[in-house]
Image: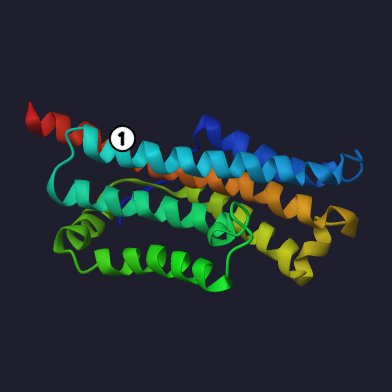
Amino acid sequence: MNLDWHWYKHSFVWLAMILAIPLTQPLHIDPGMVEWVEYGQTVFLLCCFIFTLVCALATDLKGSKRAFWLWAALWWLVLLGRDQNWGRQLIPDYPRVLYHIIGGVLIGGLIVMLFWPQVRQGIKSCFKQPFPVWDFVLAAAGFLLADAVERQRWFAQFVLYNPLYDDLLEELYEVPFMLALFSVSLCLQLRDVAQARETKM
């Protein structure tokens, strides 16, 4: 695997966000802001899905590269579905079985697409691209901290001082997770697009 250890300028932003999030507690920011954070996450994930899908279909990507990025676009849709509890937040008054079906279809789509040989080839070729390590590490840090606050893991005590802010901190830590994850995806996809253009020329 080709690793890119370059520290990008935007990486400072993701790191600053992770370090600053606990300050929402001593600053007494309204915990009710969690709903606005959730709305923002929903819009962002939808934009990530649309961007990745359009970039896969409307650029010079072909064959296994296009197949891989169509699969990646579905991942964004799955993250969006999970963020919305498979539709419970958007349409809350339907039987639970409907939400299980939505989640099953989305996750099942990811698995079924792995039987497409071009997707598997695209995954293998992705490992040949320089992989932005630090952005991935920051995405992992945001995810682990959000999970720690949500599940009350022991190391959550280092960032959560006031239980009143547990929901807000969980959602706020998901923000740098999503941003850093998209920066990883964007970096890899733009490199694939650039290579496809060079090959075409």
Which is nearer the eye, 66 or 95? 95
The residue drawn where x is 45% and y is 49% is: 133
Please say whether residue 183 is visible from this viewpoint: no
Q: Which residue is labeled 1 in the image?
A: 190
Q: Position of residue 19 (x, y in %)?
A: 73, 44
Is 101 or 166 nearer to us in this picture?
101
Q: Is residue 163 visible?
A: yes
Q: Indicate whether 66 appears above or below 154.
A: above
Q: Secondary structure at mark 1?
A: helix
- How was this image coloured? rainbow
Assess disc 1: are there few (<14), some (14-19) or many (≥20) residues with their C-alpha within 10 Å of its C-alpha.
few
> Foreground residue, 148 or 1?
148
- Seen at 34% across and 64% down, the residue is 110
46 lies left or right of 52: right
Q: Is residue 39 left or right of residue 192?
A: right
128 relative to 91 in the view: left or right: left
